[in-house]
Image (spheres, rainbow, N blue to C red):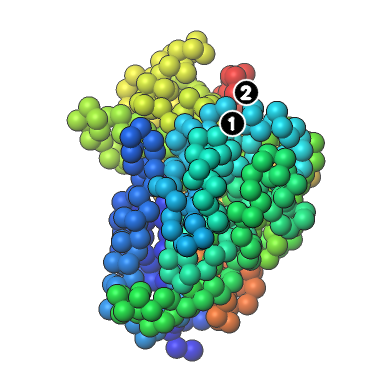
Amino acid sequence: MSEKVYLGVDLGAESGRVIAGRFDGTRLQLDELHRFPNGPVNVAGKLRWNVIGLWKEILNGLGIAAERYRDEIVSVGVDTWGVDYVLLSKTDEMIGLPYNYRDPRTEGMMAQAFSRVPQAEIFAQSGLQFMEINTLYQLLAANRDHPREMALADKILLMPDYFHWLLCGSRVVEFTNATTTQCYHPTNNDWAFDMLRRLELPTDLFPEVVPPGTRLGNLRESIVSQTGLKKISVVAPPTHDTASAVVAVPTSSTGQANWAYISSGTWSLIGVEVQQAILTEAALQMNVTNEGGVDGTYRLLKNVMGLWLVQGVKRSYDRQGKNYDYAELTMLAEKAEPFRSLVAPNDHHFLHPEDMSVALQDWCRQSSQPIPESPGQLVRCALESLALKYRQVLEGLEQLTGEKIEVIHIVGGGSNSDLLNQFTANACGVPVITGPVEATVMGNLLTQARTSGEVGSLADIRSIVRASTESRRFEPKDQSRWQAAYEQFLSLAE
């Protein structure tokens, strides 16, 4: 068959890319066309997303795609992080600058929500992990702080859905990202309207939810003229980046998972693939989340703070004029003393600290541990703590599913961290298989290929990923030392 090209727009917390996927029916080859920075912008003390700047860069990338692959391009789709949103008026005007999930406006909003709807009922109607960054609490904060703007809003679009609207005019929300909001009912397969009414949120704000792989329309004429692209299709991939990454986990297992995944990046998303949401009391007590996947599957997972901890340490030293790169920080961590001090990665002090190094030091001081002082000690503290947290989460998932996890697949940019990969194998006591690094965009692109009829099943997608990428395997080591460290970790307050 002739080679076809699909375009993936992949927006992460630190950068965005426009990537072409060249697919010959057997293998997928990636061509990064355009990369650009991303991150929250402090506007008058509030953390916002520069969506107009991101859109400009996306258009630049699409223009490059047109120059290189114009006639072969079939479609384009966008994936991003979850929970953040854009409000559109009835006349399709953006209402206000979209907030970044790390803005502290949601502090205390969970307690307010629980005063109206009990926590157990919110879990029963959403199946989602309780985090103050969730869309539900952002909307409650918006109702409190900006009631006039909320009254003007006609529809809420999550971040990837907004960029799809810019591309083709669609006003829908894709399933995998809808399920990250804590506003979607996983057994009714629609928005949790009863809960939303009781929380006094306008239910007509929530648009139609469509499954991943939905063809949303064709490019707007204005974009065709501006970029030089043909009037290609706009396809909704699994728009939540973790959902796309899980599509591209190169497992050959089918049915109930004896494997787990870690989508490793700024956040670590640790989970298993299940056929239906698990809404038990045990799931509520473990504070796990049920997020949508392809073909009606769910990602039973937990969010862990992830390499945000290491990124924060790097920023701390950057501000001091000590510009370590990540390879240098990893080397220093490898040489540092093992298990000198540990932290609970999901502690709220690490969500948006002014200085991550100080936050780590303060946490260790308050828990009567040696204070990490050097960059190597700080990074080792972060990486060891992450690996031990992964074990804690995976043990909980095993209890919920009744399945023993025999292997962990680590995908995403964090899979490049050999030190963290080895720590994870050591802590969890099972082999770790890493790759692909570009799992998110591969899941995006191959879902588009499936929509066009070039790929069949989810198993076929994963077979193509295995044929297109290389993986590495890490076997567990030093089990007795890591077991002792785990017991120490569990003794620390979460």
Residue density around tag 2, few if under 14, some if 14–19, many if 20 or more, within 10 Å:
few
Residue 83 shown left or right of residue 46 in the figure: right
Q: Is mark 1 on a helix, strand or loop?
A: helix
Count of numbered circles in the view: 2
| Residue located at (47% from left, 18% from top) | 363
Front one among 102 and 172: 172
Residue 323 shown left or right of residue 377 in the figure: left
Coordinates of residue 471 in the picture (x, y in percent)? 49, 58
Looking at this view, name the residue that lies furthest to the left: 321
Residue 360 shown left or right of residue 483 in the figure: left
Coordinates of residue 466 in the picture (x, y in percent)? 53, 66
> Image height check: is 353 above or below 201?
above
Residue 192 shown left or right of residue 454 in the figure: right
Please tell me which of labels 2 and 1 falls first in the chain: 1
Q: What amino acid type is highlighted by mark number 1?
A: Met
Q: Is residue 465 visible?
A: no
Q: Nearer the viewer, mark 2 or mark 1?
A: 1
Q: What element carries label 2?
A: helix
State yes or no: discs 2 and 1 in contact (Cβ < 8 Å).
Answer: no
Q: Distance between the residues labelled 2 and 1?
A: 28 Å
Front one among 299 and 388: 299
User: Would you name the residue on which mark 2 appears?
Assistant: 490
| Residue located at (77% from left, 54% from top) | 187
User: Would you name the residue on which mark 1 appears?
Assistant: 109
Front one among 478 and 234: 234
Coordinates of residue 194 in the picture (x, y in percent)? 75, 47
| Residue located at (64% from left, 69% from top) | 459
| Residue located at (45% from left, 12% from top) | 365
